[in-house]
Amino acid sequence: MTDLIRDQVAALIQEGIRAAQERDALPPFHLPEVTVERPRQEEHGDYATPICLQLTGDAKMAPRAIAERIVDHLPDAPFIGAVTVAGPGYINLTLDASWVAGQTGAILDSGEEWGNIDLGKGERVQVEFVSANPTGPITVGSTRNAVIGDALASVLDAAGFEVEREYYVNDAGSQVRKFGESLYARYAQALGEDEPFPEDGYHGGYVADMAAEIAQEAGRQYLETDRQEAIRTLGELGIDHVLDQVREDLAALRVTFDTWFHERRLYESGLFERLIQRLRGQGYITEREDAVWFTSSDLEDDAVVIRSPEVIPNPDERPTYFGSDIAYAWNKLVEREFDRAIYVWGADHHGDVPRVKAAARALDLDPDRVEIILYQMVNLKRGDEDVRMSKRAGEFVTLRELIDEVGPDPIRFLLLTRTVDATIDFDLDLAVEQSEKNPVYYVQYAHARISSILRYAAEQGWDLDEPGDVLLLTHESEQALIRKMLELPEVVAYAAEQRAPHRLTFYAKELASTFHAFYRDCRVVAEEAPGMTRARLMLVRAAQLTLAQALGLLGVTAPERM
């Protein structure tokens, strides 16, 4: 595991404050947490802290005077080269150039562990994502869900959490019956029967395709059995077929799950009924209008958990999605003992967030253990034009169509180039463009260029494993590249803490740009300078490792040739 430089800087500042207090340069006061950040301007150093602005009340002096006294009492640290006081009282710190150069070997020694940190300390976290209804193919909107959830899970794993990926299969309730009715109608029609299609059925072309396959394989079998039994059976067959396709499509996107949890388990196990009775006993359940409602002071309005038989005749279909969410949260946090449950939902579910948290509180669970990430929609573009490219469904674009058009790497990278709360425009033309305008191509090209340099060096007889004197790496572009590589553990920490995997795409682009500048400024292989060549080959190998690690967390390949 990698120690964060920012934490070492914070500890150094704390030691400086304590030393100043011990020597009466500062009065005694309780030491707050020291915040360390990266300055926006390079001339302000590698790190800065505004702590002195927070201490004016406790220290009874101006922040700049506080900063000067802290700096005067800072202990020596091999990784710090210069410390200055700036502005109204910021402390700016610059890393030592020799220490920075020496980190090239440390990065290489870390190997595939480079960038991994122990932020989570083994906390068990479940990330549940995609979870689209099993009544149709994965759409572009759910594809963004898949990319966000999978990348977040990878980031949390790298940050020291014990992570489990889960897909929640909604296979209970009325949508299963409606899907079965839709399949039955298309199945009967495929066999020449004049069967009306249900008004609220699933109209996509994929339903007709599926029904035609069933008709070809089973003949008139389901027309010769009880109608309701046939609808139930066809619904189950259809869901199994859809899930098989979902698994295949998501695997093509490099998304896999540890667990596929079926909603019906919550009812078949009796958990839902037990929790409703528990909530009833605690005063959280009321009944009116023939429906069962969840009521809580945490909510502005009551929420239905079991609908009225006047609305839904079949008792198995009366529990609402929110009713299932109550049991599902208990299953995660109590029965399976996850420390934290993270859900990735579309922004249209924003009204459900306070309900799930209120239900958790009512069940005596810490609502902070429930985290719900809401993401905005995807607009599919071809240049400036909106695109509807579905061949069969008519009303949506599928993940499979998107993969066939552009491939998994652009999908994963481009859908992570914005924060989750921002709508994203996915440009199909840009996704396949081989130029620096395409961010995924730009980053992958940097990795391919690195691989090309190393291949050339090996062809020229250089031993890539031979160590070099990294203290020779003093050029401005060399130092900038190493400094950028040293940011990876902190980027992982930020992405994990803020649940912001998109930060890895920004970092990958910054690292690629920094490498391209190094390549422009510094000749790597030079027969006349063997010492410098060996040092720069170490630097190039470290850059290859770091860029591959960043791309790997995003689920994007790091090609050696392009």
Image: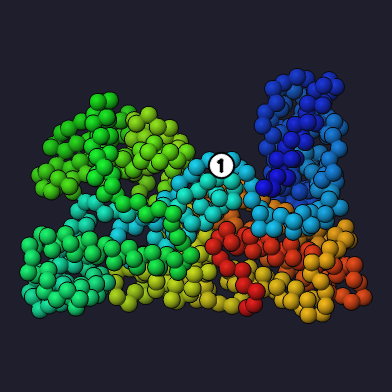
Vertical side of 41 occupied by 406: above or below: below
Is residue 179 among the parts visible in the rendering?
no
Picture residue at 75% right of the left edge, 40% below the top: 9
- Asked which quadrant contains residue 4, the reply is top right
Vertical side of 77 occupied by 214: above or below: below
Tell me where residue 488 appears, x and y as whole percent. 67, 54
Is residue 467 among the parts visible in the rendering?
yes
Picture residue at 72% right of the left edge, 63% below the top: 543
Tell me where residue 443 appears, x and y as whole percent. 63, 68
Q: What residue type is labelled 1?
A: Gly
Is 32 situated left or right of 250 in this image? right
Picture residue at 78% right of the left edge, 28% below the top: 17
Vertical side of 271 occupied by 413: above or below: below
Is 28 situated left or right of 113 in this image? right
Instruction: Rate crowding at label 1 as few (under 14), some (14 to 19) or many (20 or more) other CA atoms within 10 Å.
Output: some
Tell me where residue 432 appears, x and y as whole percent. 53, 76
- Asked which quadrant contains residue 35, the reply is top right
Picture residue at 29% right of the left edge, 69% below the top: 395
Q: Mark 1 points at which residue?
A: 122
Q: In the picture, which quadrant includes the C terminus?
A: bottom right
- Asked which quadrant contains residue 387, the reply is bottom left
Foreground: 216 or 561? Answer: 216
